[in-house]
Amino acid sequence: MEMGWLLWGTAVLLLLHVLMELSPTVNFALRIGFYCVLCLVASALAAVACLLINGGRTVKNMRIIKAVVKTFKYFFGLRFEVKGLENFKVEGPAVILSNHQSVLDMMGLMEVLPDNCVQVGKKELMYMGSVGLIMYLGGVIFINRKSTSSAKMVMSEVAKTMVAENVKVWVYPEGTRNCTGDLLPFKKGAFHLAVQAQVPVIPVVYSSFTSFYNPKTKLFTSGKIKVEVLPPIETKGLTSDDVTELSDRCFSTMRETLFRLSGRPGQAKDSS
């Protein structure tokens, strides 16, 4: 009986391997499915560790979450090449901005996440089972993107909290995932936050995933991701009147860096 189950299991694994090799759609579905299951299981285990070690919701839990998520890359054959980590070493709080490409961004985030840093995410993420629980325990700030007044109130409170508790806040200024190899126009919330709190903005850019990950073409293979932490941009003395200029400056710098890291250094100028 046991030999029969072993033979059946081997046959199924071989069949899945053949299908993955022959069909990009099957390969994509299985890898994404495995990623989702991995996130749910790892989040549940990490949540237990966070509760036992730190007792509840605190940014200190991010160290545990980071240690767990940093192992994910080995399952998917992803390699990270990181530059500029010294730019995180600013005194006091800061607003960190990065491009937002896919569900895989969590791996890139945890690869470079500095200490005492929390993320801003949409409220819906809080209801994603164990993933929502671990985000809550890690101190993630949830905002209701559908309510402009609610989002502004939350960001106003974030500005006070980040200064009082000396934490950095990680924001995706595009506001949604974008796997086109370019940047979407930036929303202004993160820049209002930085100006209101009078803290520096630190841009972080990840190279395009399109060479190894593309949902439209069902591509999901191994690959290398280049990450660059850019020098801080000061906001001291700036007012709300300067937000648009600050946003445009960050967008231009990050877009140029994105194309350079992705092997298309001249495209930013050609398409500007």
Image (spheres, rainbow, N blue to C red):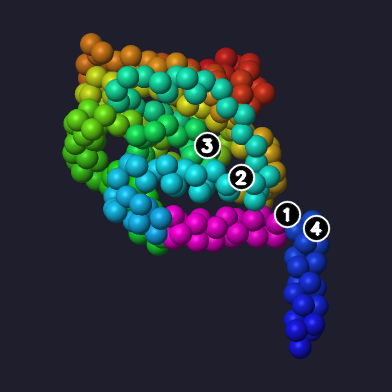
Provide the secondary structure element on which disc 1 rests: helix
Nearest-to-viewer mark from 1 and 3: 3
Q: In which quarter of the image is residue 250?
A: top left
Residue drawn where x is 22% and y is 28% of the image: 163
- Amino acid type for the residue under numbered disc 1: Pro
The residue stretch that appears in magenta? 24-47
Dot 3: what SS?
A: helix
Q: Distance between the residues labelled 3 and 2?
A: 9 Å
Q: Which mark is residue 74?
A: none
User: Which residue matches tag 2?
Assistant: 73
Mark 3, Cα crowd under 10 Å, few <14 / some 14-19 / many 20+, is: some
Residue topped by disc 4: 22
Does any portion of residue 109 appear in the rendered image? yes
Residue ranking furthest to the top: 237
Residue 213 position (above or below residue 96): below
Front position in the image: 149 or 207: 207
- Where is residue 214 shown, x and y percent of the image? 63, 44
Residue type beneath disc 4: Leu
Provide the residue designation for mark 1.
24
Q: Which residue lies most toward the front here?
A: 53
Q: Do the residues labelled 1 and 2 touch (CB within 8 Å)?
A: no
Left or right of residue 133, residue 236 in this image: left
Q: Give the SS element for disc 4.
A: helix
Q: Is the magenta stretch mostly helix, strand or loop?
A: helix
Q: Do the residues labelled 3 and 2 touch (CB within 8 Å)?
A: yes
Q: Residue at x 57, y 36 (%)?
A: 180
Determine contact: label 1, label 3, CB under 8 Å: no
Give the quarter of the image for residue 224: top right
The residue carrying mark 3 is 111
